[in-house]
Amino acid sequence: ESDVNVLNIMISYSDSNDLGSTDRSLDGLRDFCKSKPKLVSWVHESGIKLVTFIISSVTHTKYNSCRFYTLRPLNDYKEDLVYRNVDPPMAFQLELPRLMNFDITRVDHPDTSIHMFYGVSKSDNKHAKDRDSRFFVRAVIRHAELFTSQKEMQVTIPQAEDVFAKALEGLEIARCDPAHTRTEHNHIFLNVLPLLDIDVEEVEAVCRRMFTRYASKCWRLRVFNVEIRVLTSRNVKASGAPFTPLRFYLFNLTGHSLHVEGYIEMNDAVQGVTKLVSIQDKKTGSLHGSLIGEAYPVMDRVHRKRIIAQTLETTYVYDFDHLFTKEVEDMWKRYSQSRLLGGFKRHKIPMKVVDRLEFVLNEETNKLETISREPGQNTIGMVAWKYTFCTPEFPKGRKVIIIANDITFLSGSFGPKEDELYAAVSEYSRVHGLPRIYLAANSGARIGIADEIRQTFKVSWVDPNDHSKGISYLYLSDDDYATLKDSVICDSSNGQHRITDIVGAVNGLGVENLMGSGKIAGETSAAYDEVVTLTYVTGRSVGIGAYLVRLGQRVIQKRTSAPIILTGNAALNKVLGRDVYVSNEQLGGVKIMHPNGVTHEVVDDDLEGVRAILTWLSFVPERKNGPMAIMEPLDPIQREVTFVPSSAAYDPRHMLAGNADGLSGLFDKGSWRESLAGGAKT
């Protein structure tokens, strides 16, 4: 680009009332720039790409009360709204060119130091419903100091946290505007300019605490990415520079696990560019080696599937891997800390606590195979893995089979291919004696539609002039029947091709799905007899999905949006002829399934559900007929049972597990867990 220079012009009025409206000011500025030929020629010859007018009033001396209008000479001096009220010296600090993949609309914020933009991914089809829309909130922090809490011995940057809180408040207001469609992957960027004397570890800790403090609000506002840039005077990686620019990226894509990546901005002398280099040499981040000015990418296929699952109030099936990894790591932390406090040595946590291989059916041989592939590569609505969990009970690793519905694929419905994979993996768990976990989120057996027939059939009406009298039959034209005769069965005896049966061009549209449902129901029943089966209902489970839950016997159910039902409330209301049921929760929610003994345990979210799964597995041998795990106890082996039953009514659970007053029960501390707590209450 030949035009690289910027021209800033400041205009001061004696009275703030003379500033006038924004539209009138812009018209006057454009007329001024275009009315003088010598000025137009000089701007072109000088290679000026932006002309910024700073409008101020003598009565308002504060710099933040000024107005900023940026015009582009190459675009007939039209205003670039992205730069509206952006301080020219600070404009490049906001890194606005990184928004180039989106059509940007500026959104006003009460604080002029915070800049909000509503972005929609660029597309040839402006009315496409699947366009990526999100908010970008960006702020430059000019004044910042370190504050150390003497009580907690923690370093904070109060100014950064204050701006972060204001950014969230502005975002909350902006998302209420009906002009902005549902936004996902909202992004906040904070650029802290002052040089700070702070270590890399302290910067990461500050970022983590700040995000964690507002984690629930970030999730509610769909803020999945936060980017913070800090300049430290400490010499990191012996760069030799007087200061080191650090960037920390905070990702919370599932709402349960915060992932932090730290980078140093380093100049590449060979290529003449600045790149991000991971702070940790052994574990590089996802952005390692990328340019600092790279444009933000639009949502890819996996991100879109993740959004669909979250809209249905569940977790995307491949994101459960993050939850399992986080929970196993937390199990080790709790185990180690509790033993340390009890006087035992801290156990060494394995370098890799979770490993997995994905099961697929070979399309040629229909045999079960294990592969390692990226998330979202599945072509059917069922996925399965062989997990290896290195838990405190089995530090060398234990194998677990996990089968799960992908609710983003045809609503997680069961078709022939889904049934075949489910049955094959469940049989594998029986053959090898491994525990079998089922993550349920589905819509039951698939009821398909032959689109090729739907788009071509014709109707023979009883009375062509009065359609309310109904139809005589459906038929196909001669040309359509010749094309679709493999997808449909017709009676052509009367000269027309009357449709009697629809087969469909694709397998898995009709009764063949019910055949597969019977197969996997029998397989689940057999699995319960031979191995440990456990089901976690993370989303709605309908029809055959509900049967599988019940046949697996052991059930963990999420408190909301995870009913276990045979059919929906709308269908039942139609049968009954009136609105008896308001929602599916009345049919199969936790208030129904927990008291009646179907659901053994209720959890609030998917992270708690994964914790319940792993806790249940801690009571189970590694494989069928295998030895139980032996762990270091928290209680001394020689100890008294101090709880004594009284003649009055008392809670029998205190005899088993002790009570809150510190009296010990029959079982070791932390080793007893109640199941079916919702049933048999009097």
Image (spheres, helix red, strand yellow):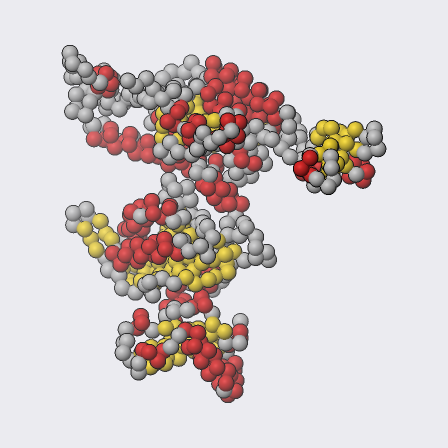
Residue at the spot x=69%, y=35% of the render?
Answer: 469
Residue 210 rendering spot, x and y as whole percentages: 29, 50
Left or right: 583 with respect to 462?
Answer: left
Residue 485 rendering spot, x and y as whole percentages: 77, 33
Residue 190 vertical placement versus 343 (above, below): below
Residue 649 vertical placement versus 465 (above, below): above
Residue at the spot x=52%, y=56% of the render?
Answer: 121
Residue 230: which quarter of the image?
bottom left
Q: Is residue 571 visible?
A: no
The residue nearer to you, when weighing 6 against 505, is 505
Residue 232: which quarter of the image?
bottom left
Residue 502 vertical placement versus 311 (above, below): above
Residue at the spot x=24%, y=18% of the render?
Answer: 653
Q: Residue furthest top?
A: 647
Residue 165 rendering spot, x and y as whole percentages: 30, 54
Q: How many marks?
A: 0
Residue at the spot x=54%, y=58% of the render?
Answer: 122
Left or right: 446 with respect to 623?
Answer: right
The residue nearer to you, when weighing 344 against 302, is 302
Residue 54 rendering spot, x and y as whole percentages: 37, 76
Q: Is residue 256 visible?
A: yes
Q: Quadrant of the C terminus?
A: top left
The residue nearer to you, when weighing 234 against 103, is 103
